[in-house]
Image (cartoon, rainbow, N blue to C red):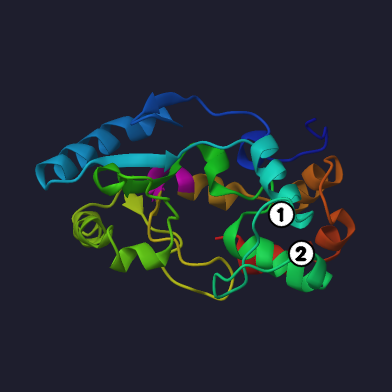
Amino acid sequence: MIPKNLTTDPLIYGLVPPPLETCLGAPVQPALISALTDMASAARAAGFDLAIASGYRDFARQLLIFNAKARGERPLLNDRGQPVKASNLSTDELLSAILRWSALPGASRHHWGTDIDVYDAGVCVDGYSLALTTAECEGVMAPFHLWLSEYLATQSLFIRPYCQDRGGVAPEPWHLSFAPLAQAYRQAFNVRDLEQVLKAADVALKDAVLARLMALVTRYVV
């Protein structure tokens, strides 16, 4: 349900989808397709099979992920990437463990259709479990990671919004954002509108999230 008193586009919070087309198997905004096609072609020429693990994701899907982690129904990791039990954590610890790795519903950049997670499909054989973590930068994905870093330095359309650990979201070197569109959505993002969206939704830990919302946005929304 879209709150009636929003002051910004509900698309920003994943409540309505942007225009979408499928590219490399994932839904993205049409404006990305030319740049994505060029990047995939360059990757192929360098010997890599660039693929997209995740593109557009709506509010309902992000809510499902968040709630499942809050209820201990999906794997939960601490800052060091080690498994922890939700039942053993305080409310603050639980929120930190969730938001370190998964966005708050309504605050994911994947809501915009501008952000993607990429990988080299060519090395994902024999039951390889894709994790999209920094550890893979030194494993089988290391050559692709090096190539991707070099390629990104030659252009200005795609950026890595989570390339550094600022104490909130874990570094995501595989997460790319199409800056010409994403920057406008980020600038339009409004905490008070997010608050209304969360109040209207069945969010686990809702009272705790709302009580800490400004601090959570400051720390985890990039």
Q: Which residue is mark 1?
A: 69
Q: Counting other residues with Cα less than 10 Å from the Cα at mark 2, is it few (<14), some (14-19), or many (20 or more)? A: many
Q: Does residue 9 appear in this view?
A: no
- How much space separates mark 2 and mark 1, taking CA atoms? 8 Å
28 up-or-down from 67: above or below: above
Q: Which residues are magenta?
A: 177-182
Q: Answer left or right for 108 relative to 68.
A: left
- Residue 70 falls left or right of residue 65: right
- Front position in the image: 19 or 162: 162
- Give percent across and percent down for residue 142: 25, 62
Q: Secondary structure at mark 2?
A: helix
Main SS of residues in magenta: helix
**Residue at 53%, 39% in the rendered image:** 112
Q: Amino acid at mark 2?
A: Ala
Label 1 element class: helix
**Residue at the front extreme, as displayed:** 126
Query: Residue 151: where, in percent of width, then height?
Result: 20, 54
